Amino acid sequence: MSVRKNSRHALTAALFAVSWIVVACDTSDPIPTVVDKAAGRENVEAMAQEHAKDTTDPSGAAQIAPRRPVISESLPYAEIEDELVYGYFVFPSNMIEPLPAIIVIHEWWGLNNNVRAMANRLAAEGYIVLAVDLFGGQIAASPSEARELMVSVVENPERAAENIRRAYEFVDDTAGAPSIGSLGWCFGGGWSLNTAMLFPDTLDASVIYYGQVTEDEDKLRPISAPILGLFAAEDRGIRVESVQAFEQSLERLRKDFEIHIYPNVGHAFANPTGRNYNAEAAEDAWQKTLDFLSQNLSSDAS
């Protein structure tokens, strides 16, 4: 994998140093309530069934090397409840000026090496990428552990919302990204939509890979970010009916969106892990993702 770790770009050191100052800054603005706990609990159980036989072994998606060298660093981007939160920060090795940023939100296993591999691939396309950690440094090794970690977020969504907010501030203020998008799979796909709700006026793009969605127009109405939704027809957790209701709500609200439902594939068809990985559907979704991000984040480096 083309990840350059020995040759550190000067920007990495600068960001690392500034991050220690930035994460300590407090904000007094209220955090919007974007998560329905009851729906979240139902989603946890649905995901537990979908992933019951999964392992953390990398799928084909995580085994594809980035198409150009990238530089990566684990660094703190937030301090929440007196604890530093570390994320995976990566960017193209030839970056000179700040690039558009993507906040990557992990699936239900946590911020593991497979998610980092996907972050590398995105960065290689010409983006600053910050893969966040919503599990407080914990990484699940089994479906039961992953379920418990998801439950912890569902029961305390305000902490996760604050985490995303600080990540946005980091790529915006510290990294100087001219535009910002979000992307997540499964658990992270739902939080990618939540990110669009948390930043209804400023987020520039939101990519949802088979994440929990809503048809609640009161929650969707403020969103200005274009949305790309990638779903599976055979998904038993994120059912087609809920996706169609989400799509209809976006249509009524005249939002900018693309929804694609892939036939004959199941949940997690493009995940960096999972037994349902489908190379053909995953590659098509990846290309749609790159086209969407290029169009909405205006990257000249991709």
Image (cartoon, grey):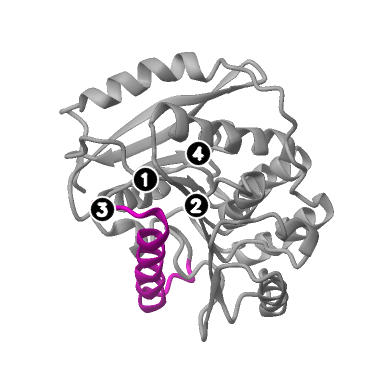
> Which of 249/86 is in front?
249
Query: What amino acid type is highlighted by mark number 4?
Result: Val
Q: Position of residue 1 (x, y in %)?
A: 21, 48
Q: Earlier in the sequence, mark 3 or mark 1?
A: 1
* Circle 3: element type: loop
Whole-angstrom CA distance, mark 1 to mark 2, is: 10 Å
Q: Earlier in the sequence, mark 1 or mark 2?
A: 1
**Residue 132, labelled with which disc?**
4
Marks 1/2 in contact by CB < 8 Å: the verdict is yes
Marks 3/1 in contact by CB < 8 Å: the verdict is no
* Quarter containing the C terminus: bottom left
Q: Residue at x 51, y 86 (%)?
A: 264
Query: What amino acid type is highlighted by mark number 1?
Result: Pro
Whole-angstrom CA distance, mark 3 to mark 1, is: 9 Å
Q: Which residues are magenta?
A: 275-302
Residue that label 2 marks: 204
